[in-house]
Image: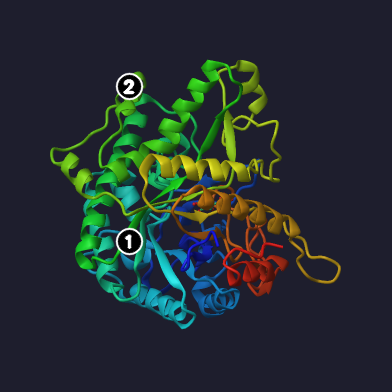
Amino acid sequence: MPFPKGFLWGGATAANQFEGGWDADGKGASVPDHIRGGTVDTPRLWDKDIDPNVYYPSHEAVDFYHHYKEDIALYGEMGFKCYRLSINWARIYPTGMEEEPNQAGLDFYHKVFAECKKFDIEPLVTISHYELPWGLSEKYNGWTGREVIDHFVRYATTLFNEYKDEVRYWLTFNEINIGVQAMGRIMSLGMQGDDHKPMFKLEETPEEASDRFTALHNQFVASAKAVVIGHEVNPDNKIGLMIAGNMTYPFTPNPIDVKEAQDKMNMANWFCGDVQVRGHYPYYAKRYFKDHNITVRTEPGDDEILAKGTVDFYSFSYYMSSCASLDPEALKAAGNMFTGIKNPYLKASDWGWQIDPMGLRIYLNAVYGRYEIPLMIVENGLGANDERAEDGKFHDDYRINYLRDHIKAMKEAVEDGVELMGYTMWGCTDLVSASTGEMKKRYGFVYVDRDNDGNGDFHREKKDSFYWYKKVIASNGEDLD
Ligand code: BGP
């Protein structure tokens, strides 16, 4: 049996894409509450002031806030061992700056954990999943402000103490390495530019890049401090990092492409893990900062904090791979910079994400070879436009095929010797897409009646993949048919 006993099979969601109840029971606005919906071709715009006449997908999302019992019961029925969810910071500290937490917000997650317990589901909590309170974002220009570290530490400490008897597994920041790319500014760092502009900003000045890397540095310090406190509060806590797994291949064997791919892997993928697992900045960062005129503003004592607060495990999302090249023709053909250069050997999803299960095996081996600490896949899945069939049901065999191929690759990696703790499929119940804000880009085993414009009554329905995943879990990954 390749998968160890106690392997954490399950699913994953994020508060801002799932909960709704954006201003319920004292919750404040967070950054995503200011971002409109988009599509694969139309970027999401963000607004400084929430416009009452505009539809913001996070405001109601798919209303887990009022459906949590039903949703967790469905996870129980599938046999989930683990449910990865995020806590919405602004539910606990509405502007991020209060001295005392919002009790109603704390109570909501107690109720959620109690439901998990009923079904023996281990919660895995992401402390910050693209959910910076708007108050902090505005006051401090997002994570650029050093002060945000203390606000985060207070928030994380509250969670560790409050949920001491309910939660063992924690992640500090979702996809922290998105902050390495200019496009990650607003989502992960909460920094703002001009009002009513696309959420993904691709061009920036060296000063803006310096702010961005300073913001990322502040997240590293905040994460390291939280790890130390989490271990003090409960030595049994397992606290991990979370990386957007960017598997990048050279487009050709031309050494300039190979070097380009290595550079991309270093900064876009390894950089944050190197800091958070090894406890210091990697050697190649110096040259990168010099070449890009970037100055990271740090303080004395930061090195010691980073060295102390290293993580217990490495978790990541994995959806696709891409290629790197310096050939102008290849770059021109690539078009969409979000997903990198197209690989002629792979097919892509309807949203242009190139499907590559073998890449997952390669990635797992590369990460484990680098750090030799336990790994966990905390996001993987296929975003697709599910259509109801004539018999009234959702026959999502394309999703089953995607997941089967990735689980097979994962199984091979475990046989290769990789130490893998678990697998939580992304968006186990349909939810709002982070990149496009659509409902149409669905990942779930469970369908939710809600569309891109906010129509629908939120009722849930099982898709074919629901029954398939149930068998996978019951057989501990043996029965994949
Ligand atoms: C990751 C995020 C998730 C999630 C997922 C799928 O980057 O951590 O929040 O949304 O990607 O992306 P999308 O929703 O854009 O399809």
Can you identify the residue that label 1 sits on? Answer: 238
Quarter of the image containing the N terminus?
bottom right
Which residue is at a point 33% across and 46% down the rendered structure image?
A: 142
Which residue is at a point 51% across and 67% down the rendered structure image?
A: 20
The front one of 428 and 48 is: 428
Which of the numbered marks, if any, corresponds to residue 347?
A: none
Residue 247: x %, y % from top left: 53, 38
Mark 2: secondary structure: helix
The answer to whether residue 323 is visible is yes
1 lies above or below 223: below
Which residue is farthest right? 390
The front one of 326 and 148 is: 326
Looking at the rendered image, the disc whose residue lies closer to the viewer, 2 or 1, is 1
Q: Tell me whether the residue at label 2 lies in contact with that at label 1, contact meaning CB atoms closer than 8 angstroms.
A: no
Looking at the image, what colour scheme do you see?
A: rainbow
Residue 344: x %, y % from top left: 70, 30
Residue 334: x %, y % from top left: 64, 28
Residue type for callout 1:
Lys
480 lies above or below 250: below
* Image quarter of residue 442: bottom right
Quarter of the image containing the C terminus?
bottom right
The front one of 172 and 94 is: 172
Q: Is residue 263 left or right of residue 436?
A: left
Which of the numbered marks, if any, corresponds to residue 287?
A: 2
